[in-house]
Image (cartoon, rainbow, N blue to C red):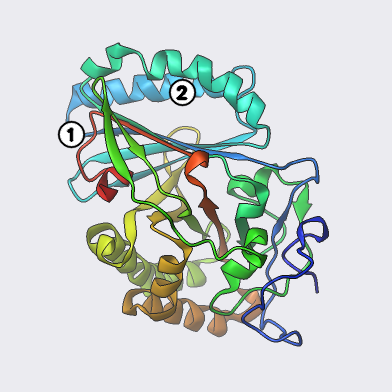
Amino acid sequence: MESAIPQHLRAQCPRQRRVPDDYTPPYPSYVARHAKTVTRVVMAYFGVQFRDDTPAQLATAQTALAHLDADFGAADGPGHWDRARCVDDTGAVNVISIAYWDDPSAFDRWFVLQQQWWSDDARLADGIGYFTELLRPRVESYETLFSANDRTEGIAVLSQHLSGMVKEHAYWGGARDRIPLSQTDDLAPAGVPARVAIGGRVRITPHDNICLIRSGQDWTDTPPEERMMYLDDVEPVLHKGMRYLRDEGVAIGCFANRYMTVLDEQGRATDKSFGMSWWTSLAALERWAESHPTHLAIFGAAMTYLSTLGPAAKLRLYHEVTVARATEQFYEYLNCHPGTGLLHAT
């Protein structure tokens, strides 16, 4: 059994974990292991917002996505990227391309060139919305978790490998215990986000220690009976919880939530989904997870499902949780409705 925190990131005098030293998790889980030379990564969310029942907007969005695809293939492009889609509470379609770098210098070079198109004033007249939500955290500031060790998602695709079975999971507070910085830092938020208008664009000046979670499900490999069980018994409960966070989450510290369907290279829906939500703090996310009826319902449905199937379950689960300083964040919105992303925070 390994610690989720790699040896070179362990503190000499860490805070006490929420479980005793002899705790043994009830099932295996794994975390991403980066090379020691990787000290900071980039997680970049590039969004296009439009109405798919409006032919002109749909055509413009497709052009924008094709341009972004070409940018990703250019020099210094991301080491991994994927794309997902959701319809928000206004009925707008949001297609988000999520790109990851483990070399911030390469990202900086790429971003300068990419912004020549993305930030051109011509975008103001395109008739669709664009947004960039960007984190560049130190590796001490985020954690990952996977239910299986033969496939990666998100930032973990850029890791060297997945760990062996780790100890810090399957209890409330496990995510905090897997974040190396939490050994010596309470990761408390500081400051208040503010809105700044810049020539037709809106930027959000963030606060310290905002929290982002990407939490995914992959039922690609499930046999018919298990697939039906997931889609009938678990997914509706998950969908309800995601909708609550989207529509009412601000009251409990969730600035924005998107329940995304992952798309393939042809833009078709896959058997993968994830929730992506921005929280005022890790503590706010923990409170929802531990005590709110919507998450307890999700947890209960998932545990019933997994306990029924046992080791035979083919559903794959993963997540990444990041806590970022204000200087590690960047948010910009153009032609987006007021409830988009971090605009909802101000």
Residue at position x 75%, y 84% in the image: 21
Does 244 sit left or right of 73 as displayed?
left
Image check: 192 left or right of 159?
left
Does residue 274 lie above or below 64 as drawn? below
Q: Which residue is mark 2?
A: 68
Residue at image point 27% right, 38% down: 195
Q: Which mark is residue 53?
A: 1
Q: Secondary structure at mark 2?
A: helix
152 lies above or below 27: above
Q: Is residue 309 left or right of residue 260?
A: right
Q: Between residues 145 and 52, which one lies in front from this camera angle? A: 145
Closer mark to the observer between disc 2 and disc 1? 2
Residue 6: give x, y in percent of width and height: 78, 59
Q: Position of residue 68 (x, y in %)?
A: 46, 23
Q: Write down the quadrant of residue 277 in the picture.
A: bottom left
Q: How packed is label 1: few (under 14 Cα within 10 Å), some, or many (20 or more)?
A: few
* Above or below, 16 relative to 276: below
**Figure quadrant of residue 320:** bottom right
- Image coords of residue 335 (percent x, y): 23, 28
Q: Do labels 2 and 1 touch, CB within 8 Å?
A: no
Real-space Cα separation, disc 2 to disc 1, in angstroms = 22 Å
Task: Kindly identify the amino acid type of the residue bearing the numbered disc 1.
Answer: Asp
Residue 226 vs 293, above or below: the answer is: above
Mark 2 neighbour class, 10 Å CA radius: few under 14, some 14 to 19, many 20 or more: some
Q: Position of residue 113 (x, y in %)?
A: 52, 14
Q: Earlier in the sequence, mark 2 or mark 1?
A: 1
- Which is more toward the observer, 27 or 327? 327
Is residue 97 among what the camera can see? yes
Q: Residue at x 62, y 64 (%)?
A: 182
